[in-house]
Amino acid sequence: MKKFIQFKLYLQLYSNKHQKYGFTMLEAMATLLIGSLILGFAFSGFLSARQIFLSDRAKVEANQRLRTIFTTIGPDIQQTGEGLVSDPKLPAIEITEVTIPDSTEKTSEIIVRKAVSPLFLNLCTDITANTTSSPNVIDNSDPNDNFCKVNDFQPIDGWPDTLKKWRDLRQSNGDTLYAYIYDQNGGGEFFDYTGEEILDEDGEDMTPSVDTPPHTVNLTTNNHTWTREYLEGSVIYLIDERKYRVVNNNLQLVLNNSQVLDIVENVDKLDITVTLQIEMGGTEYVCRKIPPTVSGDCTPNFPTDTEYSWAQIKSINVTAKILPGEDTNSTTAGVLQEEDLSLTQKFFPRNRLSF
C-alpha cells in the first residue's frame, strides 16, 4: 500500500513536470476580442485622420481657386481708367448681368479699360456716320493748327512723335491695337487700328525723313464702319480692354474683344455690385449695371436727371462663387460648406481720384 501511494505521487510529479502549456478556449476568445477592439480603434483613427486631411485639402484647393480669381480681377479693377482721365464720361468700366444657361440665376460680367499709352491723337477731319473713312490725324495744310501739324522733336526724323510711338506699339503687338474715338461729349466707339497711310503734299505714299515730313497721315482701320459722326478735334486713344465672365463654369478673360483665356475652372458665377455716390456724403446707390440705363439698375433708383460718370464710383464689391469640383463632396472628403465656396472683396478704382 505504501509503495502504491509512492508510485502515484511519482506519476503526478512526473506529469506536472512534463505537462504542455497553452490557451484555453475562453482565453483565446478574450485575446481575439481585445485584439479586434485595438485594431478597430486604430483603423477608426486612421479613417478619421484621412477624412480630416482630405477635407482640409479640399478647403485649401477651394480657397486657392477663389484667391486666384481675386488676384486676377482685383488689380485690373484698381487700375481702371489709367491714362483715361481727360473726361469722366469715358467708358472706363462696364458691368452687366447675363442669365446662366439652363438656369434662372444671373452672373455678372465686367469690362475694365485703361490706356495703352498716355499719348493720344486728335481727329483732323470730320467723320460722317455710316462711312468707312480713315481717321485723319495729321494734316499740315494749316500751320496754325497745333492739333494736326507734325510735332517732331524727339528725335528730329520727320516722324510726328506721337504717331511714331503709336506705330512702334502697334508693330510690337501683332500689328493691330484696340483704339477708341471719343467725341468729347460722352459718345464714342472702338475700332481696330491696323496701320498708317502716310502721304506727301500730292497725296502720294511716302516715308518720313528729316527733310520731308508727311503732309497727311490717316489711320487704317480694316474698313471700320462708323456708327456716328465725329467732328474735328475728337480724341483717339489706344485702349487695353479686359473682360471677365463665367462661361461653362470657367472664369474667362477676354483681351481686347479677341483673345479668350480660361483662368479658373469650376466657377459658378460672379456677383458684382457698384456703389455710386454723386457727391461726397450724399446718397449711395448700389447698382448691378454700369452705366445704369434704367431705374431698376440701382437701389435706390439712380436719378434720371443726373448724368452718370465713372468718377461717381465709390467702391466695387465682387463675390465669386465656385463649384466643389471633383471628389471634394464625397463621403471621404466631407461636404464643403457655403462659406467654403464663396468669397467677397471690395475694390476701389483709384484713377477716379483724378477727377
Image: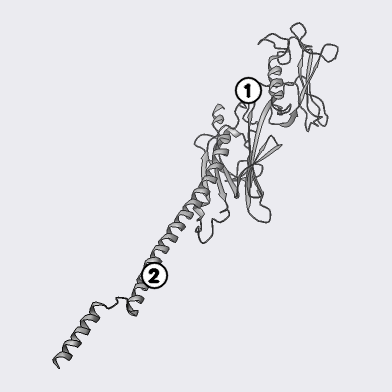
Which residue carries the number 2 mark?
36
Q: Residue furthest front?
A: 3
Of the image marks 2 and 1, the number of the one nearer the N terminus: 2
Quarter of the image with the N terminus in it: bottom left
Q: Is residue 13 above or below residue 291?
A: below
Quadrant of the image containing the C terminus: top right
Identified at 51% across, 55% down, the residue is 338
Compared with 212, 40 (above or below) is below
Would residue 251 be seen by someone viewing this image from the given angle? yes
Q: Amino acid at mark 1?
A: Pro
Question: Which residue does the image show at 81% across and 27% down from the upper left?
Answer: 128
Label 1 sits on residue: 118
Closer-to-camera residue (226/208)? 208
- Residue 196: x and y in percent read 77, 21
Cα gap from disc 2 to disc 1, whole angstroms:
77 Å
Mark 2 or 1: the one toward you:
2
Residue drawn at x 64%, y 24% as measured from the top left: 117
Which amino acid is tagged 2? Ser
Secondary element type, mark 1? loop
